[in-house]
Amino acid sequence: MRELERLIDRIIQRVNINLRELEFDVNPYTRSQVQLGKLGKFYAFYGITPHHPLNFHFSRSSLAGSYFLGKCRVDNCILYKSDVRGDELKGKGEYVKGLDYEIPLVDDEIIRIKDSLLIKTLVHNYSHDPENLEEFLIQNTASLHYANIHGSPTEGCFMGPFSTVDLTTIHDCVIGAFAYVQAGELAHHRIDPGTVWLRYGDEFDFLYRFSKEMIPRYIRHEPGEAPQGIFMDFVESRKEDFQGIYNLVHHKSSIFVPEGAALDRYAVVKGETRIGKNVLVAQRAYLEDADLGKGSNAQENCYIINSHLEGYNVTAHGAKVCNATLGTKVFVGFNSFLRGRPESPLTIEEGSIVMPHTVVDLDEPLVVPSTHLIWGYIRNREDLKTHTISLEDLARINGEFALGAMRFKGNGGIFADTFEARIEHILDANGAHFDGTRNRGHAQRNQNISFNTIQPYPEGELEGIYPTIEIRP
């Protein structure tokens, strides 16, 4: 175990060096989150399919409970119950288009994680850094529970619990708890907890900040303590349901999986649950009394409970939906928390968009009209008035606009079109439109996937460290 102790010391030192200009010390926020005795008790696992390059390299690292798919390399890291999903990495010969460039890839893209500590973190998508297209690099970075690193090369950063960095290259940044950032590129920034910020050049800038009174109730993280709050209580109360599926070598689905659909063997399914054609249910998703219509998806760390999704619904990484009815093509963004109650159900009508990191925690029944955008913190109909706008009205904005605590600047039409195009891309990528021959996506490619496990040294100085392993075709 001495090697594990040296490893975490080295990672913390490297992250702190990068963050010295921000005068941020990650040590009290990270060291207490790593229970070294647990790291030798969980296996790691990797997926093999005919559709994804098989190329893994692991050295001088602890990978306890983590999942890998695609082409990736991990060196000098601690990854605890994290998901490194490389099924959208770019391939050799593909062209990457930008505003004023078109660049061919000279090699298959690889996820490369170095000198980093990732706890229950998702890594997905592909590098959006035009300066380094073949390598999705995460280096000298610490991220905590249920953070999302989505298409975002990351160097020298700290990401708090339930934070998301989306399609944004970040250098030497501190991202606070439950903050969401999509801004292209950031360096030496400190993002406050509960900030939701989307910026696309000069085209648009969307900014919302949750109140400092509200955020600690849902997620707070004090130095030397584990993250606490309603979000943590929600996931912790259901973690025992996952234990059983990880203890089984072979796992047979408890529900019917129709044509074109994929239900990951590391997802929890309970109660009266049904999935339709072309549905994708990812690993670590949780379904209980859920009805997912054709083409819908439940991505990693999603919880769908006592809810009906009409069809072609996107439930992005970490989103939670309880006691709700979602119309066709409703999008629920990263780490959103939608909690209706049996006596106060939530209805979101067709074509509406729930912004990433939205909290809807109801004390009365609520209906969100069709083709609306919602954001922020909503408990009732009165709150909804200052946290929603129709997509038609949004498209008319050209300049500055404010509603409640939300500030928008730029072209609302481009903002709406960008969101809608991305939703359609996600549906295509996930295979929602598969017709039996054409439009194959993740749901179809993940039907024939096998998992292999790898385990660490069980005792001695190397306890919890995994042997250096190279896995190729």
Image (cartoon, rainbow, N blue to C red):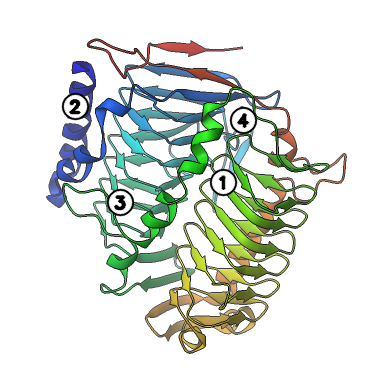
Quadrant where the C terminus sits is top right
Q: Earlier in the sequence, mark 2 or mark 3?
A: 2
Q: Position of residue 17 (x, y in %)?
A: 16, 37
> How many C-alpha atoms fall within 10 Å of the one at disc 2: few (<14), some, or many (≥20)?
some
* Residue sitting farthest toward the right: 436
Q: CA distance from mark 1 to mark 3?
A: 21 Å
Judged left or right of residue 302, residue 250 is right
Disc marking residue 91 = 4
Q: Quadrant of residue 260?
A: top right
The residue carrying pointer 3 sits among few (fewer than 14), some (14 to 19) or many (20 or more) residues within 10 Å by Cα, namely: many
Q: Is residue 139 above or below residue 357?
A: above
Q: Residues within 10 Å of mark 1 (few under 14, many from 20)?
A: many
The residue wearing badge 3 is 160
458 shown above or below 433: above
Residue type at mark 4: give it: Gly
Q: CA distance from mark 4 to mark 1?
A: 27 Å
The residue carrying mark 1 is 285
| Label 3 secondary element | loop
Label 4 and label 3: CA atoms lie apart by 31 Å
